[in-house]
Amino acid sequence: MNPKTNRITWDRLRGLLKDNGARPEDLDRFDEVRARRRFFQEIGRGGAAFALLGLGAGSEVAMRGLFGRGLIPEAWAQEADQPAKVAGREAMTVHNTRPVNGEFAPHLLDDDITPAQYFFVRNNGVVPDEIMNKQVKDWSLSIDGEVQTPLQLSLQQLKEMPSVSMPLLIECGGNGRALFEPSVRGNPWGRGAVACGEWKGVRLRDVLEQAGLKDSAVYTGHYGADVAL
């Protein structure tokens, strides 16, 4: 505990949870959140903060003792004092920074086509370095497996193929999760994890027809350069 700031360390908090009966799986979730440096813009009293994590036995007792005396974990205090921001999307409510996950207030989503700067961000992994650095000239799409003619298509080749545009709505399956009673584990999405964009691209059907599907083909699998954390 830090007497100068009236804050408690992560390790001490974990020990209190364990001493008060937290299950091994609850402690694993605590460690996961700690490792990812989850951001809490609103840290409540009592058991509210740990309700966001979905932790079970031990959290209520430990949190009543800590929050009831005005104590909060030191790392949480530092993060709450400085809410996370993403460059170019300062209006976004950030739920994670690695990987980035965040949403915008519902009143910014009134347009029939959601402006790109207000599109929610949902990632399971970090953006690959080659994309971040705009080094895509050597990028290619591989189509292999149950096809007659395996293909390797460059970005330029894809751009030269016939394309279509259409408005399509996309929504995170956890949209509204912060409103659930009882609370559940996961990013605390409000109502902003939904957007309608105008999408343009090559039909998957056209690419597969070019490769020639075998009769044994059953489903498609999609693999990217991003690595899940």
Image (spheres, helix red, strand yellow):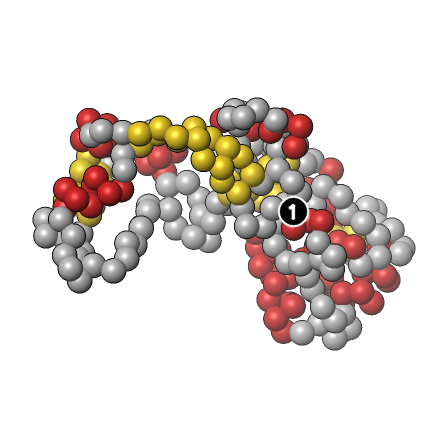
Q: Residue furthest left?
A: 149
User: Mark 1 belongs to which amino acid?
Assistant: Gly
Q: Is residue 39 left or right of residue 57?
A: left
Residue at the (58%, 40%) spot, across then down:
193
Q: Mark 1: which secondary structure?
A: loop
| Image position, residue 36 (x, y; %) | 57, 51
Q: In the rendered image, which quarter is residue 198 located in?
A: top left
**Residue 134 pos. (x, y %):** 33, 29
Residue 173 appears in the figure: yes
Relative to 44, is 66 above or below?
Answer: below
The residue wearing badge 1 is 176
Q: Nearer the viewer, residue 112 or 35?
A: 112
Task: Tell me what residue is drawn at x 77 percent, y 73 percent.
Answer: 20
| Whole-percent x, y for residue 179 in the image | 71, 49
Q: Is residue 21 above or below residue 111?
A: below
Q: Position of residue 51 (x, y in %)?
A: 73, 58
